[in-house]
Image (cartoon, rainbow, N blue to C red):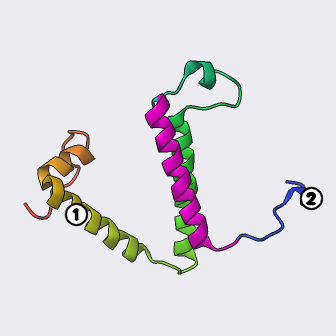
Amino acid sequence: MAEDQTYKKGLGDPFLMIGEEGLEVAKEVMKAQRFGLKGDPAWTSQPGNSSPRSNIIQEIGDFLYILDALIARDDISVGEVEYAKRLKGQKMAKLFGAQAVETWFYKGRVAPFPRKDK
């Protein structure tokens, strides 16, 4: 990028950035709800346009990049994120049942590792 095209305000707060990226993921998921994951062929066949699925993947990548930055900066730790993921799994298991969540998580395939609670 040429010098005159760079953003002059600085990178900003990564916590605000991850919030923004989370909203962008949500926005693309809502578009997929409206148009389907493949999107409207009249739109997606045009140069430069992509499917809602591709847009969701791009936004998840953007979110994960900022998450990696937060970890690299020691603003949060991998352990904290892993702990939060385990809590989410426990909440879902409590709401829906452990077997239902496992089936949903692996799309009906057998889990690649045995559950610790078995």
Q: Which residue is mark 2?
A: 4
Task: Check residue 14 for magenta coloring.
Answer: yes
Q: Which residue is mark 1?
A: 91
Q: At 15% from the left edge and 47% from the top edge, which residue is drawn?
A: 100
Instruction: Tell me where residue 50 appears, x and y as whole percent.
Output: 61, 32
Q: How many marks?
A: 2
Instruction: Tell me where residue 24 appears, x and y as whole percent.
Output: 56, 51
Helix, strand or loop for the magenta stretch, by majority:
helix
The CA span between labels 2 and 1 is 49 Å
Residue 37 visible in the shown view = no
Left or right: residue 16 versus residue 48 is left
Q: Amino acid at mark 1?
A: Lys
Which quadrant, please, contains the C terminus? bottom left
Q: Dot 1: few (<14), some (14–19), or many (≥20) neighbours within 10 Å? A: few
Q: At 58% from the left edge and 60% from the top edge, which residue is drawn?
A: 20
Q: Amino acid at mark 2?
A: Asp
Left or right: residue 75 versus residue 89 is right
Q: At 16% from the left edge and 52% from the top edge, which residue is drawn?
A: 96
Q: In the picture shown, does residue 99 fall above or below 67?
A: above
Q: Dot 1: what SS?
A: helix
Q: Which residues are magenta?
A: 12-35
Which quadrant, please, contains the N terminus? bottom right
Residue, far bottom = 74
Give the quadrant of residue 93: bottom left
